[in-house]
Image (cartoon, coloured by chain):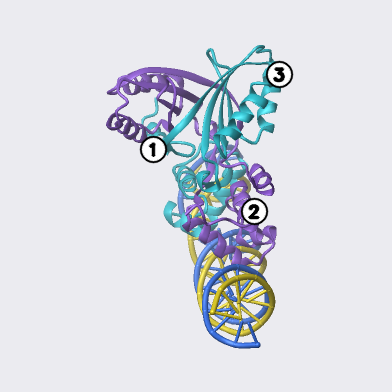
Chain colours: A cyan, B purple, C blue, D yellow
Amino acid sequence: MAGARLDPIDRKILAELQADGRMTNVELAKRVGISAPPCLRRVRALEEQGFIRGYHADIDPRELGFEVQVFAMVGLQSQAEADLSAFEARCRAWPLVRECHMLNGEVDFILKCVAPDLSTFQRFLTEELTAADNVGSVKTSLVIRGAKDEPGVPFDILEARLDQPA
Amino acid sequence: MAGARLDPIDRKILAELQADGRMTNVELAKRVGISAPPCLRRVRALEEQGFIRGYHADIDPRELGFEVQVFAMVGLQSQAEADLSAFEARCRAWPLVRECHMLNGEVDFILKCVAPDLSTFQRFLTEELTAADNVGSVKTSLVIRGAKDEPGVPFDILEARLDQPA
DNA sequence: CCATGTGCGCAATAATATTTCGCATATGCG
DNA sequence: CGCATATGCGAAATATTATTGCGCACATGG
């Protein structure tokens, strides 16, 4: 599957759609240097092959009243696979938890959370997260300010590497 | 600015476009229950008012050969504003760093990084990040597996809160 | 009760997406 | 070599969508 190597046009398409997911196919075709029909066929293929997982509007949480963003480091008491899975399932069910990644090292999971205000988050923290089954330690850090938030993949790196194959 | 309160239709539009940023305006209008022209006007207004910051294709890093994802906790030696800004600027220039957030607490910044392989990341870590001016401590954690990665804002929470104004 | 503003939706037009099909280049094999 | 097959492009035709230009309905405040 992953062997389906992409040609330079495919990579350009991915880079352009990552930068502007609502670009029209006509504009996209112009930018990658082919006509509209084959361009559309390539996009569909990239979607079906899983290179493109979807398209999302980037909504500003602040404007919607979500003033608080928090990273939570979670340690579990048991790291048995069943217990890990159970915790992941719980995270998927919590709307305030937007991301959940399992880590190596002392901390088992890192969670990215959003909330309308600090008290809403505190309530979630004490009544839900810390109180959840098998949760050992939770350390939280408030995001003071965001400095960078780029989506996905650095295509400039990708192109640079392909120029110099090992 | 934020006083420009959104009505239920606007919120539905945002929720739909967050879930599928490439939905046609006709389909969107159908889902939110108005006709296409006013729907498009609302979308344009939401874009101009900053509620929608952009649209992005969600590209799978694995498929592109970015096998490694790492969180790095960075402590600086000086937290003077000029030094904080300098570090943020450096992060913005590093392609492997996709996100950079300033935190409260002992750690100053958390970075989300991607790399094609571990050795590429190690090289970046030792030759760039740790070696950078004013960087004190760096602790990294490899992402073993992803359990949840939702974009943006939990609209279900938003609607629930608006039903019960304080 | 009327002036004004806001926002909807119909209808017309412009632009885009999508399908169909023939052509060119590449590849494998007799 | 020279022909079958495969792959991928692009022109042209058609179907959908986006966008513009009104006129109408409803709410607000004299």
Quadrant housing residue A94 = top right
* Chain letter belonging to callout 3: A
Between B165 and A23, the one lying in front of the other is: B165
Q: Mark 1: which amino acid? A: Asp
Question: Is residue A109 in view?
Answer: yes
Quadrant containing the C terminus of chain A in the rendered view = top left
The residue that label 3 is drawn on is A133
Q: Amino acid at mark 3?
A: Asp
- Mark 2 → mark 3, Cα distance in angstroms: 34 Å
Q: Residues within 10 Å of mark 2 (few under 14, many from 20)?
A: some
**Residue to which mark 1 is pinned:** A156
Q: Quick one: quadrant of the N terminus of chain A?
A: top right
Q: Residue at x 54, y 31 (%)?
A: B62
Give amino acid for label 2. Answer: Lys
Q: Which residue is mark 2?
A: B12
**Marks 1 and 3 close (CB-CB < 8 Å):** no
